[in-house]
Image (spheres, rainbow, N blue to C red):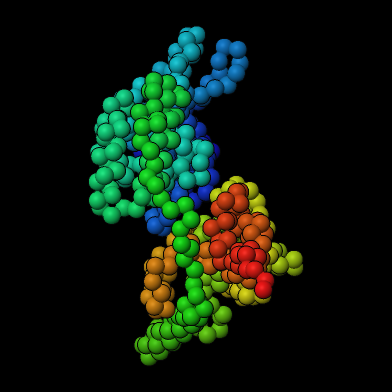
Amino acid sequence: MRENIGVELLRSCKVNSKRKTFEIYDTKLKGFTLKIYPDTVSKSGEILPGAKTYLVRYRLPEGKQTRTVIGRHTLYTPAQARDKAEKILRSVKDGSVPNDSKPQVSTLREYLEQVYSPWLIQNLKTGAETESRLKYCFPDLMEEKLHEISPRIIEQWRTNKLKSGLSPASINRDLANLRAALSRAVEWEYLQVHPLANKVKPLKIDKNPIIRFLDSKEETRLLKALDSREATIRSERDSANEWRRVRGYKLLSDLKEIEYVDHLKPMVILSLNTGMRRGEVFSLRWKDIDFKRKIATVRGEEAKSSVTRHIPLNELALAALKNWQKQTEGEVVFPGKKNDQFNHTKRSWQSLLKMATIDHFRWHDMRHHFASQLVMAGVDLNTVRELLGHSDIKMTLRYAHLGPEHKAAAVGLLVKKP
């Protein structure tokens, strides 16, 4: 794609709905390029804009094509970036190969924005979200010099977070993100030694936490709430159309003629009966559904483990998908308002839980519910692991206590016969 890389272009490509990285080549200066990364969706449902990075491409004297990263669009105007690209191209023409492997950075913020984040976004599916999380969790560290980040500073941060009520597991995850960023800084020679290595230990947490799943009464209430919600929305649509009819306005579509009023019910039914992650449900395409073989495929590029897996569809999931397909268009199974990939369900999900009087139950817990029901039905853990897409059986062992028959049989051996 060729365009004049300028202010107007930056304004017009705020949202990258293509869900993939692409490049725009400047029409004024050959080699000058704007690389745009895809938008991501945080766990809270917030859309995180994809990064935009300036770079310049050229050939080395021996003919090999390479590039120099200039920096993110927040650090340079298009004119400034083009001027820098011209200088680089001029130096290459004069026989001087620019050393672009190490941009000069001092603070953690500079390192994140100029060095680590471009790599993160390019190599990890959750790169943009991780960058946003680092800036959100460590705002006081952003202006610290990289070599001045010390265990004492981190311990103080951790103490304050514990006092604020943040869970040890969340603190450990945030510190793991920071530790990974600093590990790369050492690897890329921005730091001589890792400031946290073997000095800040992770907080102790329960490695076998209680799994939240629905009991039979909660499951019944959740399904009844879905039906009640559908009936309420249909009733509201009928009232709205009556109001429009009296005033001579164009009527809205009759919701009684379709199976579902919106995405929520089929999405919940699918999640409860397949154990798919929320992101996997959102990214599902109709081409991933084999109605004849009754299988849903989670593609590797969308799976957390990056490994493709195939999930059998039971009668409930299959019927939900068949009925939903009749009232949707496009390739995405659950499209958003602009017929693009869905990105969040926070408001409708919370309203549904309130209606069902269910507390402390996240969307992700439907995945736990699926696995728990399988284990309690006697399904072996390795099969559960394959269905969930766990790369390690250790993740699946958290459900082992729900199938206690083998433990009861083992303990029963201790009973002495009279």
* Percent position of residue 202, x then y: 39, 42
Q: Residue furthest front?
A: 418
**191, above or below 38, in the image:** above
Quadrant containing the C terminus in the rendered view? bottom right
Q: Considering depth in this image, is 171 or 60 the residue closer to the camera?
A: 171
**23, above or below 223, in the image:** above
Position of 205 compared to 124: left or right? left
Can residue 13 be seen in the rendering of this structure? no
Q: Residue furthest right?
A: 292
* Percent position of residue 315, x then y: 67, 75
Q: Considering depth in this image, is 304 or 249 the residue closer to the camera?
A: 304
Quadrant in the picture for residue 84: top left
**182, above or below 96, in the image:** below
* Label total for image: 0
Can residue 224 be seen in the rendering of this structure? yes
Q: Residue at x 65, y 65 (%)?
A: 413
Q: Residue at x 48, y 80 (%)?
A: 217
* Percent position of residue 236, x then y: 40, 84
Q: Residue at x 42, y 25 (%)?
A: 186
Q: Residue at x 58, y 56 (%)?
A: 396
* Percent position of residue 372, x then y: 56, 66
